[in-house]
Image (spheres, rainbow, N blue to C red):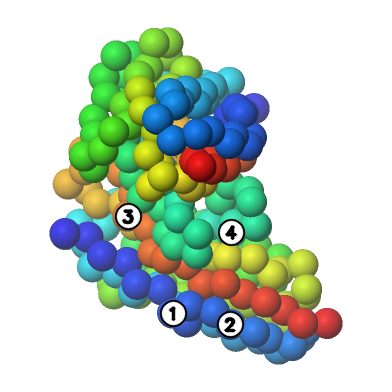
């Protein structure tokens, strides 16, 4: 059974204080690892897809990295508008055409001005 | 470009009443479609998915059902709502041959 564990559950940062969010996963065959951002009362917004260990992707102040066991979402010099819940999910090759995802419980990030 | 719609945005229903939530996708053909429920402060629980018209797979036993009457339309239903059905319901789609799921704005359901 696929499992995704995100840590920490909540993180409070001062504006400009860089940090990382962790996503540990177990999957029989990785189809892809996905990062989403979710604002309160809204649907998750897609950020990144990573497919293989060593892959990195960046978008503004966010950088996602992937190893065989975990992924990190690095936030450099965050701003208050980066405050949100960040969700990690994995897709398993065994899901075939269904392409289901298994989600973690998320990290709630608060960036204080 | 592709767009996903969900309605209603918010719904308050009494226990025992029926439910119908609708999701439609624009700008793509033959997508996979998904229904999730998100409890407060928790991750997403997959309820149903569909790989084509009339094809529905259920992930968890419950009093909810799903239907896909058209290629880009996905409906979540219940004949009699329970208090435990309260939550945030999200619809998602993934394009043919693609991997990334994209989510709709969600429906907040409160059962009283």
The residue nearer to you, when weighing B86 against A31, is: B86
What secondary structure is marked by label 3?
A: strand
Mark yes or no: residue A67 visible. no
User: Where is mark 2, residue-wise?
Assistant: A11
The answer for which chain carries disc 1 is: A
Q: Which secondary structure lies at badge 2?
A: strand
Mark 2–mark 1 Cα distance, whole angstroms, equals 9 Å
Q: Quadrant of the C terminus of chain A?
A: bottom right
Vertical position of residue B20 compared to residue A43: above or below: above
Query: Would residue A42 be found to the left or right of residue A23 on screen?
Result: right
Mark 1 on the same chain as mark 3: yes
Residue pointed to by mark 3: A102
On residue A37, the disc is: 4
Q: Please tell me whether mark 2 or mark 4 is closer to you in this view.
A: 2
Q: Which badge, 3 or 2, is on the more N-terminal residue? A: 2
Packing grade of label 3 (10 A; few <14, some 14-19, many >=20) is many
The tag on residue A56 is none
A40 in relation to A93, above or below: below
Q: Do discs 1 and 4 share a chain?
A: yes
* Discs 3 and 4 share one subunit: yes
A111 up-or-down from A53: above or below: below
Instruction: Examine the image and state in which quarter residue A104 appears.
Output: bottom left
Residue for badge 1: A7
Q: Which quadrant would the N terminus of chain A be assigned to in this image?
A: bottom left
């Amino acid at each position: 059974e696929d499992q995704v564990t995100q840590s920490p559950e909540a993180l409070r940062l001062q504006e400009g204080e860089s940090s990382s969010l962790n996503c540990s996963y177990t999957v029989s065959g990785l189809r892809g690892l996905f990062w989403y951002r979710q604002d309160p009362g809204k649907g998750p917004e897609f950020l990144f897809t990573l497919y293989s260990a060593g892959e990195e992707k960046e978008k503004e102040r966010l950088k996602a990295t992937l190893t065989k066991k975990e992924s990190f979402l690095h936030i450099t010099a965050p701003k208050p508008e980066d405050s949100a819940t960040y969700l990690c999910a994995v897709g398993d090759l065994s899901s075939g055409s269904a392409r289901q995802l298994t989600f973690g419980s998320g990290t709630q990030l608060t960036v204080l001005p | 470009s592709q767009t996903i719609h969900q309605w209603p945005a918010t719904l308050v229903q009494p226990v025992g009443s029926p439910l119908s939530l609708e999701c439609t996708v624009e700008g793509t053909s033959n997508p996979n479609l998904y229904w999730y429920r998100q409890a407060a402060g928790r991750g997403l629980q997959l309820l149903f998915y569909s790989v084509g018209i009339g094809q529905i797979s259920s992930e968890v036993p419950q009093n909810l059902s799903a239907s896909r009457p058209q290629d880009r339309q996905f409906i979540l239903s219940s004949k009699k709502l329970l208090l435990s059905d309260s939550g945030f319901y999200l619809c998602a789609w993934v394009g043919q041959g693609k991997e990334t799921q994209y989510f709709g704005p969600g429906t907040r359901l409160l059962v009283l």
